[in-house]
Every structure is written in structure tokens, then in C-alpha cells.
Image (tube, rainbow, N blue to C red):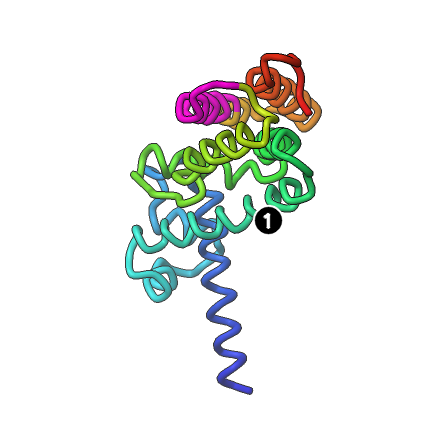
Amino acid sequence: MLMRARTFTESGRRAQIVRAAIEVIAEAGYLKASFSRIAKHAGLSSTGMISYHFAGKDDLVAACVTEIEEVTGAFMQPRIDAAAGHVAQLRAYVEANVELVGEHSAEVRALIDLVKNAGSQSAAVNGRLALFEEHFRTGQAAGVFGSFDARTAALSFTAGLDAVVATAAAAGTGPTELARLGRELADLYVRATAPEATGGSK
């Protein structure tokens, strides 16, 4: 029982530090996210507690990225999975990604900063290009997308989505406007990928 209690306490402390680090990075940026600042935000008596749980700042940052990916995935994936068909899944991905800014603003802002200023690698972010490209190719094979270069479309769409998300996160855009932006962007992507013969989606 004592061993279990200790493990739970250490696990909880580690999560507390990661949460504080994410919030500090979101607010002040990676370059200003010192251990002393994170410790103060977490309500710790010293930075030694951080050093006890993490080998260094890179280790803590990696834990932050993992946590962010879990949180964002838990928000987005159920909506994508619930959508039936390539077009509906494309719409669900775009709308969920934009609305994510309002639901988990700290995580979004922190991840943007970590990728930009810390050179952090995020499997979820890095894998999107291949994900979009494969989605377009299989949708074209199924006849629900038009004829276009899947790679070019994937590059364009991920860049556009990133621009909308980053701008909304920096501006602190509210949920109503985020929902509108998500719908508008999704409409744009659906129209751009529609079969030429129908001009619409299936």
C-alpha cells in the first residue's frame, strides 16, 4: 500500500509539473519558461522537484508534447471517427482542429511555440501531411474527390489550417467565431476537392 501510494504521488506530481510547464510556455513562451518560473506556477517549493522528475528541460518539453498530443487527440479523434465517409471526415478534422483552439487554448499555444522555438517534434503534427495525402488518394479512388495532385493539396491544406489555428490562438478568438471559422474553412476545402462533374460532394 505504501509503495502504491508513493507511486501515485510521484505520478501526480509529475503530471502537475507538466501541466504547469504547458501553461507557462503558452503564456510566456519556451524561451522564458525557466524551471524557477514553472516551479512557482506549480506551487513547488524549489526547482529540485522538477529535476527529480525530469532529466532536464528537453525531457520536460518532450513530456509536454506527449501530454498535448494526448489531450488534442482525445478532443479531435472521436469527432473524426464519428464522421462517415471521406468528405465528412475531412470536414470533421478541419472543424475539430479549429475549435480545439477554444477548448484547449493553452495546449495549442504551447505546441505552436515549442515547434517554432524549441525545435520540438510532434508526431501528430508531422504526420498530418501524409495523413491528408493518403486521405485524398483513397477518396479519389472512391470517386468522392476530384482530380488533383494529392501531395500539393495536402501541403496547401495543412498550411492553411495552421495559419487559421495560429492566428485564432494568438488573437484569443471566442468559441462562436471559432466554430464559424471552422465551418468556413471546411466548406472551402470540401469545394476545392469536389469532383469536377458534380461541383459538390457526396
Compare residues 3 and 99 and report the one nearer the observer.
Answer: 99
Residue in the image at 51% along x and 72% along y:
9
Query: Does 152 appear above or below 43?
Result: above
Compare residues 122 and 23 and report the one nearer the observer.
Answer: 122
Report the predominant secondary structure element of the magenta stretch.
Answer: helix
Farthest bottom residue in view:
1
In the drawing, does residue 58 fall left or right of residue 147?
left
On whether residue 49 falls in the magenta region, the answer is no
Q: Quadrant of residue 126?
A: top left
Residue designated by label 1: 74
Q: Position of residue 86 (x, y in %)?
A: 61, 33
Q: Position of residue 182 (x, y in %)?
A: 63, 24
Query: Does 199 appear above or below 15?
Result: above
Residue in the image at 46% along x and 45% along y:
22
Q: Which residues are magenta?
A: 147-164
Residue 27 appears in the rendering: no
Q: Quadrant of residue 119?
A: top left
